[in-house]
Image: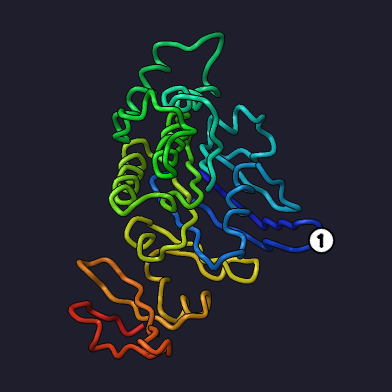
Amino acid sequence: MILGVDELKFMYRNQGILEDIAFSINEGEIVAILGPNGVGKTTLLKCLNRILVPKQGVVSVCGDAITSLDLMEVARRIGYVPQRVETGRLTGFDAVLLGRRPHIGWDITGKDLRIVEAAFRKFGINHLRLHYIDEMSGGELQMIAIARAFVQEPKILLLDEPTSALDLKNQVEILHKIQEIVSEHSIAVVMTMHDLNTALRYADRFILLKDRSIHICGDRSVITAEEIEAVYGVPVMIGEISGVPCVIPRCLCNGNGRKEKIPEERVGSTYVRNT
């Protein structure tokens, strides 16, 4: 177990946000945290990284309670990419190099530079090396932020909506790179997502939040039409395309703005599971 969470509870002022959160993650896993807006996905991610301090409960990383680690050690074990990345007058290269800070002693070494160079190649962002990050598009900035977290050489990567600012091509590329990183470096990735179909394609396990707690947790088998409707309040069908599950809403608006229920025969070549 690389990450463990036990009886975690978090409150903003006197308002309960998360209650009785418990799960564990092993190395080599990609875990997607799912749920409606405002359910606490980002809050949970920040609790895992000690950005927010839970009211109760324990978060452990590699067997150590995160509260027992100093901030530099937390940064050596956990890389974090927020939804909104702060900008400044830094080049892309310098921004990524900042990810080496938890490992730098008296000065930057050749090893640090080699790791940063390798990250630019791996993520295909060499063209951004000398661009200023405050002049980059949202998608370019997101790629730089993920590369910066990667060069920390963490055991766990926490990604908050990692594809929200990316076009389709870059979504596919970055999530494929994340899969490669997990496989090659035996780390774990925890990411919040809104797109259920993207999560089903790239994640190994899923945590669905509802009413301040975990509604259900597990592999693809837990993603059923009934559970999705229970969490999101939307009736769906679960299809399958090339062996990958696909969530299809059962209601669409017709030309008059009225909702109509999609008959299963209109799903086309998609195979629909009766779940």
Q: Is residue 252 left or right of residue 78?
A: left
How far across and down, in percent of the image, does residue 271 sit?
A: 22, 79
How far across and down, in percent of the image, does residue 27 sit?
A: 43, 44
- Please give the name of the residue rendered at 53% of the width and 66% of the height, measured from the top-left corner: 35
Tell me the quarter of the image containing the C terminus. Answer: bottom left
Foreground pick, 141 / 174: 141
Q: Secondary structure at mark 1?
A: loop
Q: Is residue 87 above or below residue 160?
A: above
User: Residue 38's image quarter?
Assistant: bottom right
Q: Is residue 78 above or below residue 225?
A: above
User: Residue 266's image quarter?
Assistant: bottom left
Foreground pick, 264 / 156: 264
Q: Is residue 263 left or right of residue 231?
A: left
How far across and down, in percent of the image, does residue 195 sit?
A: 41, 63
Residue corresponding to mark 1: 14
Q: Residues within 10 Å of mark 1 (few under 14, many from 20)?
A: few
Residue farthest toward the left in the current orientation of the protein: 269
Q: Is residue 99 left or right of residue 247?
A: right
Foreground pick, 181 / 58: 181
